[in-house]
Amino acid sequence: MATLEDPIDIGGLTVPNRLYRAPLLECAGNGPDAVDALIDDLEPAAASGVGLICQGATIVRGDGGCAAPGMTRVHDPEFTSRLSRLTERIHDHGSRIVLQLEHGGLRSMETWHAEFRRSNPELEQLAVSTPPWQLRALDRLGFLTFEPHVLSTDEVYELAADFGRAAARAVEAGYDGIHLAGANMGIVQQFLSPFYNRREDEFGGSPEARLEFLALVHDEIRERAGDVPLLTKVPAETPAPPVVRRKLSLSDGVELARRLERIGYDAVVPVQTSVVWDMSIIRGEYPARAWENERLQEEYDAAFGGATRKRLVALANRVQSLQYDFEPAWNEDFCRRVRERVSIPVLAEGGIRDRTEMDRLLDSARELDGDGNDDGTGTGATDADPACDMVGMARPFYAEPRLGARLLDGDAASALCDNCNNCTVPQVTGAPGICRTPSVLRKRGELEREGVYD
C-alpha cells in the first residue's frame, strides 16, 4: 500500500517520493539568462520536497518544432552543458530531474503563429503525412495555414537520431532520465495517431507500425545515452471532435502502453488528449482575465493574425471551457486500465489537486468512510485497486512554486490553483508561466507569511 512519501524505482533510478512536478512551459528560451530562468522555475519545487521534477517540453532541433514561443532547445552541446547548473541545484535538494523532449510537428509555430511564420518563411512544417481533410478544411477557412513537408523514411530516421543525440547531451548535463512528449498533439502523438498517420512505409499503416517511431527513438536513446530511465506519455484521443472518426481509443492507449513496456520503456503517463489544440488537456474555466488583458492585445493579434482571428480563438476557448469543464483526476480511469496491464510504473496527472485525492489514487484499496477518507476503523467501503504509482501536477506549481511542502506535510492540503487558466493564454506571446489571479496570489502570500512553505 503506497503512500505519497514512499520512494519508487523507475528504470533503476530511486525517486525519494511519489509526488512529481508535471511538465510545464517554462518559456526560458536559450538566451544568456535561460539557465537562471529554469533554476528559478524548477528549484522551488525540489526545495519543497517534490521527488521528481519534469522539465517541460524541450526541442531536439535548432530550427522549428516549437509549439509555443520561448521553448528551450537542446540541440547545442555548449548550451546543454550549461544546464548542469540546474541539475546540480535539483540534486542538492535530494530530488531527481528528467528532461521532456519534443518536436511539435504540425502543432509547431510554423503552422499557427502568424508573425513567426512571416518572420521565418524558410522554416518547413514537418508532417507525418498529408494533413487529414478536417485540418485542410481549417486551412481553406483561413483558421490555420498548412504547407507541410511530409517526412521521408530517411528523414524519420534522422529525426529519431536527433532525439537520441539530445538525450545523450542531457545525460551528460546531469539529467536523471528522459521523458518523451508522447501526447498533447506533438509529433510523437502524430506518429501514433490514425488521425495524423496515413503513411505507407514502415512507420504507418497498422497500430504496430505507427508505434515504430517510438521504438526507434527508444533504440537511439539507448545507443547514445545508455540505460537512462525512459518515460513517455501515452495518448488516448477520447476528447477528439465528433468529426474525427480515426483516433486512439482508451483500449488503443492501453495496448500502446503494453507494447511500450515490451520495447523497454521504464514508465508511462497515460493522458486523454485531443487531436487538435483545445482545452481537453487544461480543463477549467474560460480565462477571461487573460483574454481581456489590454497590454497583451497587440501580441495576441500578432500571434493569431489579426483582431478577427484573435476573437475567433477566444470564442473557441469559451466554448471549449464549457465542453471540458474541470474534472478531478480526469485521467484516473485510463491510468487504472493501463496499470492493470503493465508492470512498469504508471504516472498520473490531470486534475489532481489535493492530498486526499493523491492518497486515494496511490492506495485505493484502503478502507474509506462516506466522505472518501481513510477512517482508520476498518469498517468502511473499499475502493478499487490503485490507479497509479506516482501523482503529478502542473498548473498548481505556477500558483505555488513550493507546493510540495504543504502536500508532503501529511495533512489534507489542497492546491490553491482554481483552474482559471489565466496562466496559459499569455504563453502564446512568450510570456512566462506564472499565476496571474489576484485571489490566489493573496492566499499564497498569507501562507508564505505563516511559514507553511518553509
Image (cartoon, rainbow, N blue to C red):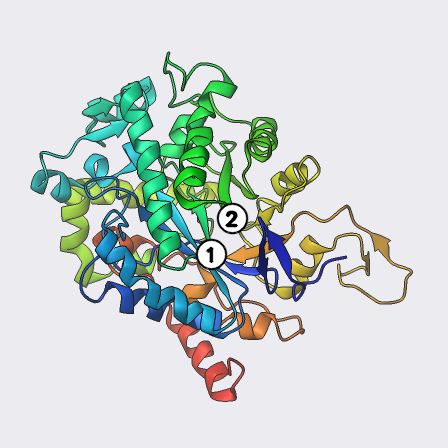
Q: Please indicate, yes or no, whether residue 241 appears anywhere in the rendered image.
A: no
Give percent across and percent down for residue 1.
Answer: 77, 57
Q: Residue at x 28, y 56 (%)?
A: 80
Name the residue tied to disc 2: 229
Give percent across and percent down for residue 231.
Answer: 50, 45
Q: Residue at x 28, y 54 (%)?
A: 427
Give percent across and percent down for residue 52.
Answer: 51, 60
- Classify mark 2: helix, strand or loop: loop
Mark 2–mark 1 Cα distance, whole angstroms, equals 7 Å
Nearer-the-camera pick, 266 or 25: 266
User: How many C-alpha atoms fall within 10 Å of the one at disc 1: few (<14), some, or many (≥20)?
Assistant: many
Q: Residue 264 carries which label?
A: none
Nearest to N terminus: mark 2 or mark 1 = 1
Does residue 109 lie above or below 411 as drawn? above
Drawn side of residue 261 relative to residue 119, left or right? right
In which image quadrant can residue 289 be found?
A: bottom left
At label 2, which amino acid type do we have?
Answer: Pro
At label 1, which amino acid type do we have?
Answer: Asp
Give percent across and percent down for residue 21.
Answer: 48, 60
Asked if marks 2 and 1 touch (Cβ < 8 Å), the reply is: yes
Does residue 167 lie above or below 190 as drawn? below
Q: Which residue is drawn at 46% across and 57% down?
A: 394
Does residue 253 lie above or below 233 as drawn? above
User: How many C-alpha atoms fall within 10 Å of the one at disc 2: few (<14), some, or many (≥20)?
Assistant: many
Q: Which residue is drawn at 32% across and 26% down?
A: 156
In which image quadrant can residue 222 be found?
A: top left
Does residue 349 lie above or below 50 as drawn? above
Q: Residue 176 carries which label?
A: 1
Nearer-the-camera pick, 189 or 379: 189
